[in-house]
Image: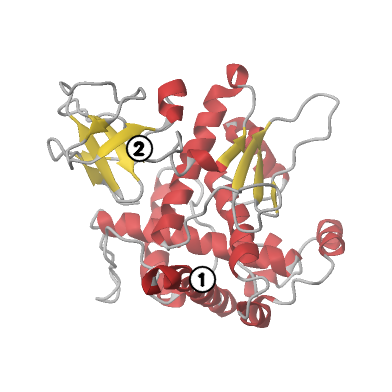
Amino acid sequence: MHPFSCGHCGTTVFFENIRCDTCGATLGFVPDEGRMAAFPPDAPGRIDGPDIRTDDGGRPLRACLNRSLHEACNWMVAADDPQPRCRSCRLTEMIPDLSLHLNAWRAFEQAKRRLVFTLIGIGLAPEPKAGPDDPRGLSFRLLASLPGEPPVLTGHDNGVITLNLAETDDVLRETARVSMHESVRTVLGHLRHEVSHYLQQRHIDGTPAIDDCRAVFGDERADYAAALATHYARGPADDWPQHFVSAYAGAHPWEDWAETCAHYLLMLDAVQTASAWGLSLDGPADAQPGGDRTDTTTPARHLALNQWLPIAQFLNAMNRSLGERDSYPFLMPDAVLAKLDCVQQLLARAAATLKAPAATA
């Protein structure tokens, strides 16, 4: 994620900001333009209400309804868009009781906006499901487990991503991480993993790309329930670090794809962030991509070895200096690099397919 600038005074601002601390301008992110709109403090109308405002770029915009109602979003909606919510918030179809879980929902939506930003950047921006049988759309549910009811399971099912609300609680999430022997567990990481399942179902299953995917990740038609039961009963194979990006990736080809794709999305975001901030580490001269765009053309192997791993190693070393655990405790053996290359190629192909009709229209 690269930093932005206030369109009113030019000060550096960040993706989550709702106001410029320097000039007092109200800020709102315009997703289809990838910029932060600025509204001077003395401008008429209310940016946090339903009023249509003209920003510094001269475009009529209005705030996402979730900003107006709950101060839970900083994205803007085009004035002529019939949808009251922004491109990220409109993907959420089910939320918990906000009188009890407002902050949890805000944390979930904040992580989701970062995910949607990345998906827009790689040309695979999702649209909301038109109905339960819509095979193309995507929707999110943030649900709380209730006493006496089966626990809410985080997962993906036919374009519906469900997140257990407990994952937004730092203490509960860390407890789960330790009990499940995981290296890292974050809300954004969950969403990247689950959206990777969606990307495979939406853009690869049922297309010629599935053969390329199977050649690298294995046959996803293998019994999923049986594979997971075996994984949890016996644990991962002793040599899993030589073949998979995580122990869980070895459970089934679906999980191998999802874990690897999630790491690819993480790398794209992290490398863009480092480059935009001018972070330069010893390495090849071509190891610095453009800072304001998501680099989907660089082969994933190159992205990992020459751009991401030097950054990750620096972050790990810095964390150790601060007495913290490694922020990226993962290895990149050749088998994983080959899988990352496959992910990059298949997602780029999917984005090109989506773009093709518009280009020929």
Dot 1: within a 10 Å radius of its alpha carbon, few (fewer than 14), some, or many (20 or more) residues? many
Say if 91 sits above or below 242 in the image. above
Q: Residue at x 24, y 76 (%)?
A: 285
Q: Is residue 304 visible?
A: no
- Quarter placement of the C terminus: bottom left
Q: Is residue 120 visible?
A: yes
The disc labelled 2 sits on which kind of residue? Answer: Met
199 or 176: nearer the eye? Answer: 199
According to the picture, the residue beneath numbered tag 2 turns out to be: 76
**Number of numbered discs:** 2
Horizontal side of 180 relative to 76 (left or right) equals right
How far apart, in angstroms, are the residues tagged by discs 1 and 2? 27 Å
The numbered mark at residue 275 is: none
Q: Residue at x 19, y 21 (%)?
A: 44
Horizontal side of 52 relative to 322 (left or right) equals left
Q: Say which element carries label 2.
A: strand
84 or 82: nearer the eye? Answer: 82
Horizontal side of 352 relative to 99 (left or right) equals left
Q: Residue at x 31, y 50 (%)?
A: 34
- Which x, y percent locates residue 85? 46, 35
Quarter of the image where one finds residue 303: bottom left
- Which x, y percent locates residue 166? 66, 33
Dot 2: within a 10 Å radius of its alpha carbon, few (fewer than 14), some, or many (20 or more) residues? many
Quarter of the image where one finds residue 65: top left
Q: Residue at x 79, y 72 (%)?
A: 221
The disc labelled 1 sits on which kind of residue? Answer: Ala
Whichever of labels 1 and 2 marks the residue nearer the N terminus, that label is 2
Say if 193 sits above or below 36 in the image. below
Q: Are marks 1 and 2 in contact (CB under 8 Å)?
A: no
Q: Say which element carries label 1.
A: helix
- Which x, y percent locates residue 146? 77, 26
According to the picture, the residue beneath numbered tag 1 turns out to be: 350
